[in-house]
Image: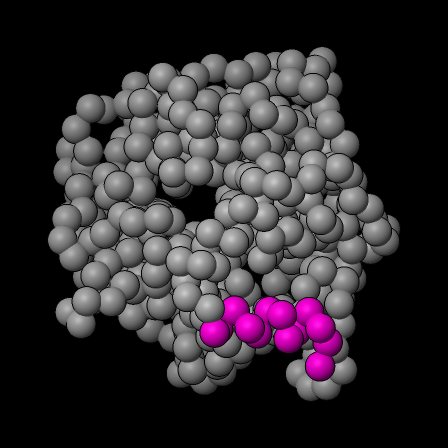
Amino acid sequence: MSETRKRLLSCTLMRCGTVALFIGLLSACSSTAEQTTGGSPQSNSQSAGTTAAGAEPPGSPDIPYTAQTLASGLEVPWEIAFAPGGRMFITERTGSLRVIENGKLREAPLLKLSDPSVSDGEGGLLGLALDPQFERNGRAYLYHTYRTEEGGTANRVLRIIVGSSTAEIDRVLLDNIPGDTNHNGGRIKIGLDGNLYITTGDRYEPELAQDKNSPGGKILRITTSGSIPEDNPWPGSPVYSMGHRNAQGLAWQPESGVLYSSEHGQSSHDELNIIEAGANYGWPLIEGDETEDGQPKLVTPLVHSGKETWAPSGMTFITQGPWTGELLVASLAGQQLLRVSLPSAGGTPSISSLFKEKYGRIRNVAEGPDGTLYLMTNNRDGRGDPQAQDDQLIALRPDWK
């Protein structure tokens, strides 16, 4: 057994609060020096390595967008979703579903979650996805943290019905997803197949990520009615992939349909992965470029951050303008936006840094229907240095239109 494996597995013997403090201290002290090793993206997800994050100064003429603050004073915004007709929906970790209409944030939330919903640490109202038939049925899907009847913490997926001025809970699609103060995962997206894909965390119990019977430390896949797709890797199970520590980003490459995810490492070695059904991404058995003999084969990341800490979260592929085809990844601890160029014929992805320390902690990035990019800051999440305008929703308007 490798020394890293022994060290990672020892997490199960530590109290969660101690682990959280340890990770927080490491993240705070992490070097911002560039780290580079080999690696090339391949559709079989077996390539590995990290690529340098070269700095690109804010306001560079190479950035074909102009920034505009669309909303300020938000309470830890987590996800944004775009509806036909121009409405934009935003989740705040404190439990509110908000809406932006005609470019303005409506003061009253559409929905405010209450008991048993909780918002502690990294938990709260997190992911949001709109149904493919949203314009007709008004359905949307939320991921949030709640207190169980036994007094523990868990996460669940809700289906809600959104009206013109309010939203109401329709049904619980999936519950009892392991949760805690931290490591709750939380991203949900509608896949190209119309199913819901859901990232979950290991709640500081690393062994959950290797337990096929636990939804913790996984990417899950269910239908929009809450049933298990017949072609899931394990019959009757929502588990789509396993061995994840705390994945928080999902995005499909438009041309290939390949699914990518972002994932937090223990203190560095944050990952970008190509996700395949039934694959095991190794946590807590391997990290970074480590490999381990045996079956099943453990998948190493497409790229990782080396000794640097990114704390990557939301991500999006660009489909319009001069950056078409590139992947953008929000970075919390790194306080930047990562721009990832994926070569079409193999080779090493190149990663550059945008807006380094300009906006603080960036939770999410999304591309709107008209090509505008939207950034969400999370400086009020308990780990940032909030300014008077925080948190913000920042629109990057295309200069090329």
Please state the extent of the stretch shown in magenta in the rendering. 1-13
Residue at 47% over, 52% down: 21
Q: Is residue 232 at all visible to an observer of this figure?
A: no
Q: In which quarter of the image is residue 54?
A: top right
Residue at screen point 60% across, 37% down: 334
Q: Is residue 275 magenta?
A: no
Work out which quarter of the rendered image holds the N terminus and state it: bottom right
Q: Which of 332 and 163 is in front in this view?
A: 332
Q: Which residue is drawn at 36% across and 68% down?
A: 178
Q: Position of residue 314 (x, y in %)?
A: 51, 43
Q: Nearer the viewer, residue 232 or 117?
A: 117
Residue 215 screen position, x and y as percent: 41, 72
| Residue at 63 percent of width and 26 percent of height | 356
Give left or right: position of 133 versus 321: left
Q: In this view, does 52 lie to the left or right of 382?
A: right
- For the residue pair 385 and 378, the one nearer the viewer reads as 385
Is the magenta region chiefly helix, strand or loop? helix
